[in-house]
Amino acid sequence: MSSGSDRARGSGGGWTRRRFVGTLAGAASVTTVAASAALTSDPSPAAPKTVPPTAGSAEGTTAPTAGSSAPSVGGSGARPLFLGTYTSVEGGGKGIGLATYDSVTGGITSTGAVITGVGDPSYLAAHPDGRTLYAVDEREAGRVTAVGLAQNDVLGTRGTGGASPCHLSVHPSGRWLLSANYGSGSVAVHPIDASGALGERTDVVTHSSPAPGPGQQGPHAHQFITSPDGGHVLAVDLGTDTVYSYRLDESKGTLTEVSQAHTRPGAGPRHLTFHPDGRFAYLANEVDNTVAVCAYDAATGRLTPGDPQPTGTGEGTSYPAQILVTSHGSYAYLANRGHNSLTRYAVEADGARLKLLDTVPVGGDFPRHIAFSPDETLLFAANQRSSTVSVFHVDGESGELRLAGEPFASPVAVCALPL
């Protein structure tokens, strides 16, 4: 469907850049980059392509971490790792970086190749069948891009109908791509065809109610995911302190709002992850430096946030970024950007309670994104301001984290997706 079918629910408010960009290692403060400056500094390449290893290129010259036993490309145990970055900032990447990691040691090896033709690919997600990768183009004229993994070729790009998309996910059916436009406070839906390519968006909805929270100029959609039961899709909005629940019409790709969950004013919810049994979820609040356990009703889609809990990082905000929970539901991990740490929680009472255990230094600056390897024996942290990716061994019984060698250098690393 064309953009004429888009349904805006009220004014989106002012557009505020979400990036916390500090491209130099050890930067003393976080810099907000205006959209116009970012766009003019790095126009999109004329034609998408995969750039092979080149002597002197940033991605091609990074060696395996000292003391690691990372294999050469194609070696035993080597698995693909895709790296998201900002291409429009000083010291940023040239596109989606390609690397491999050793599934046993955690050592990362650069392939030197980059998938170009994607502007500011700051968040990545894979199709459930493993054949296609999707990236946001975090620009004022927001877009999403599909990449075929057989040849690492760009399959096409579609507009999101909003500004500065910062998150996307694939519906479990594999037929719909869900994306969140931070700048305009809206969420969008695109169909996915049999090849993995994207069709024109079928819906876009702008959050207009409730009014923005303290210190916010408008809505800021930060995440758009599907509930474990597949019955609802949920959008986390930092600007309105709200998690919106929608029904997705899987025949038309349209959204119907069914519920709203409100945090305390000024919490700034950023990221939600579900316990594997689907009855509880965990919400990371960026602005007030808390997490909350939320009850979830699969029948109605209603999310009910509990009391805010500490992150273990002390007073003030450490800009919590992302929270993960293990597939067996025993442990949860939170990335703290200001504190440069990972918080470990024990999940108790069948998912209804989080117990703070400890915080571990992340080994980098400003951990923006964390992800498990498919077998959950490794945890990857993309450290934006130090331009590195840290890898941790995850103890399956205790949940303890152990750093796997020195962090891997990657330009303005804001997303690390191991497959």
Image (tube, rainbow, N blue to C red):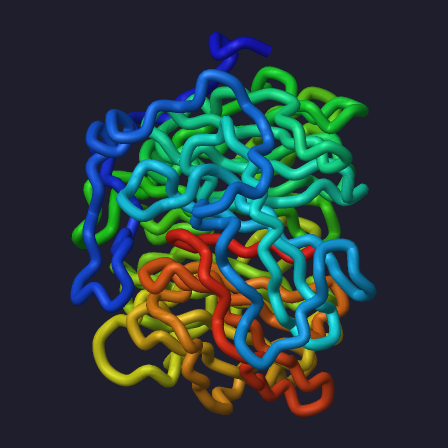
Q: Residue furthest front?
A: 55
Tell me what residue is drawn at x 46 percent, y 77 percent.
342
Instruction: Inspect this view and state whether residue 295 appears.
Output: no
346 in relation to 334, above or below: below
Tell me what residue is drawn at x 62 percent, y 26 percent.
154
157 in relation to 329, above or below: above
Where is residue 211 shown, x and y percent of the image? 26, 42
83 in relation to 287, above or below: above
114 in relation to 359, above or below: above
Residue 107 as seen in the image, left or right of residue 284: right
Where is residue 141 shown, x and y percent of the image? 37, 23
Where is residue 263 shown, x and y percent of the image? 37, 60
Viewer-side residue, 226 vs 357: 357
Image quadrant assignment for residue 353: bottom right
Tell me what residue is drawn at x 50 percent, y 91 percent.
357
Viewer-side residue, 204 vs 303: 204
Viewer-side residue, 352 vs 382: 382
Viewer-side residue, 225 vs 155: 155
Residue 207 as seen in the image, left or right of residue 194: left
Where is residue 331 shown, x and y percent of the image? 62, 80
Q: Quadrant of the C terminus?
A: bottom right
Residue 335 as seen in the image, left or right of residue 280: left
Instruction: Inspect this view and state whether residue 408 appears.
Output: yes
Residue 88 as seen in the image, left or right of residue 67: left
Tell me what residue is drawn at x 73 percent, y 69 percent.
103
- Count every numbered label the image shows and give the total: 0
Q: Quadrant of the N terminus?
A: top right
